[in-house]
């Protein structure tokens, strides 16, 4: 398990998922990343910094946004 920094690109409030770009990786985005429900939708603005928990380092679909900060 590992926590990494990312930047929010798009938030889908209906599915509570996000498209994110990992810090330092300007070529690829992760899409449909689950967002913890304790994070208010109003805080999920494009460009905000995120804390992302990777439960499995080899499976990018097994991730969760756990924090949003500026």
Image (cartoon, rainbow, N blue to C red):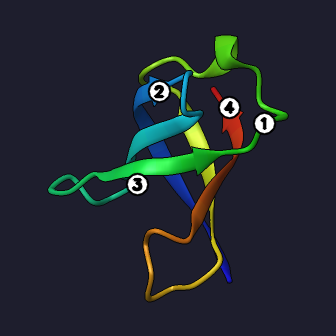
Residue at horizontal 21 percent and vertical 52 percent from the top: 26
Work out whether 2 lies above or below 12: below
Residue drawn at (54%, 33%) of the image: 15
Residue extending farthest to the front is 14
Question: In the rendered image of this protein, does residue 40 appear above or below residue 59?
Answer: above
Q: How far apart are labels 2 and 3 at the CA level? A: 17 Å
- Which of the image's four quarters has the C terminus? top right
Could you say which disc has been placed on residue 23 in the image?
A: 3
| Disc nearer the start of the sequence (1/4) | 1
Q: Are marks 1 and 4 in contact (CB under 8 Å)?
A: no
Mark 2 / mark 4, whichever is N-terminal:
2
Is 62 situated left or right of 41 in this image?
A: left
Q: Disc 4 on helix, strand or loop?
A: strand
Q: Nearer the viewer, mark 2 or mark 4?
A: 2
Q: Report if the CB atoms under discs 2 and 3 are less than 8 Å apart.
A: no
Q: Marks 2 and 1: in contact by CB < 8 Å?
A: no
Q: Which residue is mark 1?
A: 37
Position of 16 relative to 41 (above/below): below
N-terminal label among 4 and 3:
3
Q: x%, y% of residue 35? A: 64, 43
At a point 57% along the width and 64% down the height, the residue shown is 63
Q: Position of residue 66 (x, y in %)?
A: 73, 49
User: Gap in Å between the C-alphas at discs 1 and 4?
Assistant: 16 Å
Q: CA distance from mark 1 to mark 2?
A: 13 Å
Could you say which is closer to the camera, residue 12 or residue 66? 12
Q: CA distance from mark 4 to mark 3?
A: 14 Å
Residue for badge 2? 11
On the image, the x and y values in percent for residue 52 come to: 61, 57
Instruction: Classify mark 2: helix, strand or loop.
Output: strand
Which numbered disc covers residue 16?
none
**On the rendered structure, is 53 left or right of 9?**
right
Mark pair 3, 1: CA separation = 23 Å
């Amino acid at each position: 398990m590992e926590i990494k920094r990312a930047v929010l690109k798009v938030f889908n409030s209906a599915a509570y998922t996000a498209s994110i770009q990992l810090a330092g990786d300007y070529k690829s985005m992760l899409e449909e990343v689950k967002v913890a429900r304790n994070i208010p939708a109003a805080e999920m603005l494009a460009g905000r910094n995120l804390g992302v928990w990777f439960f499995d380092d080899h499976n990018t679909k097994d991730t969760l946004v756990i924090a949003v900060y500026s």
